[in-house]
Image: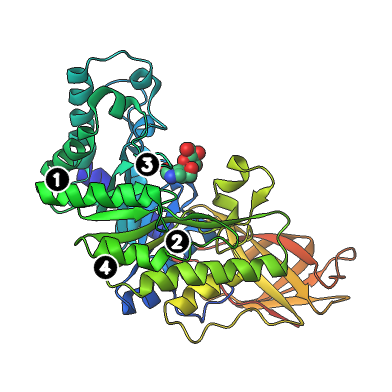
Amino acid sequence: MRSSLRAGVAALVAAVGLATGTAHAADTPLRDLGAAKGKVVGTAVTGSRLTGTYGDITGTQFSAVTPGNAMKWGSVEPARGSFDWTEADQIVAFAQAHHQQVRGHTLVWHSQNPSWLTNGSWTSAQLSDLLHDHIDTEVGRYKGEIAAWDVVNEPFNEDGTYRSTLWYDGLGSGYIASALTWAHAADPDAKLYINDYNVEGVNAKSTALYNLVKSLKQQGVPIDGVGLQAHLILGQVPATLQQNIQRFAGLGVDVAITELDVRMQLPADSTKLARQAADFRSVVAACAAVTRCVNVTVWGFTDDDSWVPSAFPGYGAATPYDENYQPKPAYHAIAEALGGGTTTPPPTGACTAAYSVSSQWNTGFTGQVTISCSGASLSSWKANWTFGAGQQVTQAWNAACTQSGAAVTCTNASYNGSVPDGGSVTFGFNGSWSGSNPVPTVTLG
Ligand code: 9MR
C-alpha cells in the first residue's frame, strides 16, 4: 500500500518537475562534476517547495537531498503514536524520481523533539525503549531508501564534554552506541553517521568526536562516518579543515560536509561575495583532496531557503544562489573546486535576463523574467525567447508580450523601460503547458 502510494507521489513529482535550465544552463551541473570526482553533492530541502525553479535546480544540480526538518522526531511523531510522514515521503519520492541519494536527518537530537517526549518524565528504561522504537520505526520505514543517516546529532559541548540532553542525562554516553546499533539492525545497508558543528577544524570538540569514533570502532559499534556540519562565518574556514578530515579518514570512516553555509553581515556586496566564494572553494577543495570525504551538502541552496536570517538577525546571504535563484560567485567556486573548468561567472558590464517559473499546476504556470544590469544600463528593453514544448503566454504584467508560434517577445511598459546600473526590473506572465515545461533561454534585444 505504502509503496504504491509512494510510486504515485514519485510520478506526480516527475510530471510536474521542470526540465533543466537555469541562468547558466550550459554549465556542467554540480552533481556531474562531483560524480567525476567520486563526490556526492547535496542540498537540504523543504518538501513543499520542490516544484518550479526550486525543484528544477534541486533535481538538476544535486545528487543528494537532506530533509531540512521533515525527518526530525517532532515532525514525524508530533503526538505520541500518531505519525506524519507526508513531507518525508515526498522528499524521498522526489529524490528517487531524480536519481538522488537521501541523507536521513536526524534520529537522536536534543532539539526539535515533540513536546510529549520532552515534557514527559521517563525512567531510563522507558527512555531507552522510546528511542529504540523511534529508530526502529523511522529507519525501518525507509529501509533501503536512505544512503546515510545522521543518527546522532550534536552530542558534544564546545570543550569536548558530552552535552547535557534528554538522552545523555537519562542514558549516559552509551546512548550513542545503542542508537547506532539499533539503526544498523533496522537498515544494515545505510551508512551511519555522527554529525556535529564546530568540528570542522582540529579543536577540543572535534578531538572529542575523534576519540569517540575511535572507541566505537574498537568496540565494533557500527559507525561509518562523521558529519562536519560547516555552518561557517565569512572568512573563517578553519585552516586545519583538510587535516581534520584526513585524521577522521585515518580511523577508517567516511567524512561528509553535511550542512555547509557561509554567513555574512547584510547587505551583501561584491567584496563579501568574492570572499564567500573563496570560502566555499576552500571547503569543497579540502573534501575533494581526501578520498574518504564522500559528500558535500549545502544547508539550502538558495538564500530564500536558509535558516541563517532568522537565527542570526542581520546576517544572511549564506548559500550559493541568491533569493532569485541566480547563481552567486560561491556557486562558480564550488564548481571550480570540483574540477569544472567551463563555468563562467556572469559577464561584467552587461545586462542579463533570467527566466524562472514561480508556480506551476496541471495545465498552467506563472513565470517571471528579471532583467539585471551591472556595469551597464538600459533605457528600454525587449526580452525574447522561444518556447521548447508548445507553451503559450496567456497574460502578462509589467510588460507587453506577444507570441507568434513558439517565439515570444516582451517589451517594457511605459514605466519600467529604464534599468539602472546595479538595478533590475521584473515582469511576470501566466502561461499554459502540457507534457513538459522546459525553461527557455531569454535574450535581450
Ligand atoms: O534548517 C533547520 C531550520 O529550519 C530549523 O528551524 C532549525 C531548528 O533548530 O534546524 C535547522 O537545521 C539544523 C540542523 O537540523 C542541525 N544542525 C543545525 C541546523 C541549523 O540550525
Q: Which amino acid type is marked by label 2?
A: Thr
Give the vertical position of 190 relative to 84 (above or below): below
User: Mark 3 falls on what kind of element?
Assistant: loop
Residue 154, disc: 3
Q: Residue at x 31, y 72 (%)?
A: 290
Residue nearest the observer in this picture, 262 or 319: 262
Q: Can you tell which of label 3 and label 2 is closer to the viewer?
A: 3
Q: Disc 4 or 3, which lies upstream in sequence?
A: 3
Q: Residue at x 69, y 73 (%)?
A: 353
Instruction: Please name the residue that numbered disc 4 is placed on.
Output: 292
Q: Which amino acid type is marked by label 3?
A: Glu
**For the residue carrying disc 1, how many other residues have a C-alpha within 10 Å: few (<14), some (14-19), or many (20+)?**
many
User: Mark 1 falls on what kind of element?
Assistant: helix
Q: Can you tell which of label 4 and label 1 is closer to the viewer?
A: 4
Q: Is mark 3 within 8 Å of ligand 1?
A: yes
Residue 184, disc: 1
Specify how the rendered protein is coloured.
rainbow
Q: Disc 1 or 2, which lies upstream in sequence?
A: 2
Instruction: Please name the residue that numbered disc 2 is placed on.
Output: 58
